[in-house]
Amino acid sequence: MNTESEKTFSCQCCGHCCHGTGTVSLSPADQESIAAFLKLKPKTFIEQYCVIKKNRTEMKIEDGHCIFYGNDGLCMIHEVKPFHCRQWPLHPSILGDQGAWEAIKSDCPGFDPDMTYSEACDLVKNSRNES
Ligand code: SF4
Ligand code: SF4
């Protein structure tokens, strides 16, 4: 993240985005990376840590949070966390949808409370250019 982004978004490690009734979808690359990190075969990783929802593979929820949310409030697979977790909260849905921005901002205390919609769009665009 560049210097401009750091002025306006800073993760507070509150864990809110790791809680809920579902998690993010895992791409095949995510599944391979996490399985390798855990020293498991992909099939075993999916059986132990994932749930299949129609055509989506997600991480399981336990006690109201992602199975990889640790007791210390940190992600247990931070080094290989899924693409959508690395991307969050600078989600492309913000672009062209101010309602999506307002919803994400209200759930994430990492944004500067004074950030405008235009500034949020610039942040998302910059993050996409860097990835
Ligand atoms: S909700 Fe925002 S501030 Fe909290 S952990 Fe997630 S990204 Fe960080
Ligand atoms: S993989 Fe890590 S960052 Fe992503 S939801 Fe689970 S605990 Fe949170």
Image (cartoon, rainbow, N blue to C red):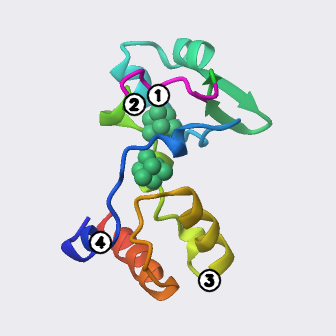
Q: CA distance from mark 2 to mark 4?
A: 24 Å
Q: Which is in the foreground here, disc 2 or disc 1? A: 2
Report if the beta carbon of the residue with label 3 is closer than 8 angstroms to ligand 1. no
Residue 53: % across, % down: 76, 34
Residue 96's tag is 3
Residue 130 visible in the shown view: yes
Q: Is residue 62 magenta?
A: no
Q: CA distance from mark 1 to mark 4?
A: 25 Å
What residue did someone put label 1 on? 69
Q: Secondary structure at mark 2?
A: loop
Instruction: Using the image, determine if residue 81 lies above or below residue 42.
Output: below
Q: Magenta span covers which residues?
A: 64-72
Residue sitting at x 54%, y 69%: 92
Q: Quadrant of the N terminus?
A: bottom left
**What amino acid is labelled 3 in the image?**
Gly
What residue did someone put label 4 on? 5
Whether label 2 touches label 4, CB < 8 Å: no
**What amino acid is labelled 2 in the image?**
Gly
Disc 3 residue crowd, few under 14, some 14–19, many 20+, Cα 10 Å: few
Disc 1 residue crowd, few under 14, some 14–19, many 20+, Cα 10 Å: some
Instruction: Using the image, determine if residue 120 lies above or below residue 53.
Output: below
Residue 47: % across, % down: 62, 14
Q: Quadrant of residue 67?
A: top right
Q: Which is in the foreground here, disc 4 or disc 3? A: 4
What residue did someone put label 2 on? 73
**What amino acid is labelled 1 in the image?**
Tyr
Residue sitting at x 58%, y 37%: 19
Q: Nearer the viewer, residue 109 or 86?
A: 109
Q: CA distance from mark 4 to mark 3?
A: 19 Å
Q: Of the residues under marks 3 and 2, which one precedes in the sequence?
A: 2
Whether label 2 touches label 1, CB < 8 Å: yes
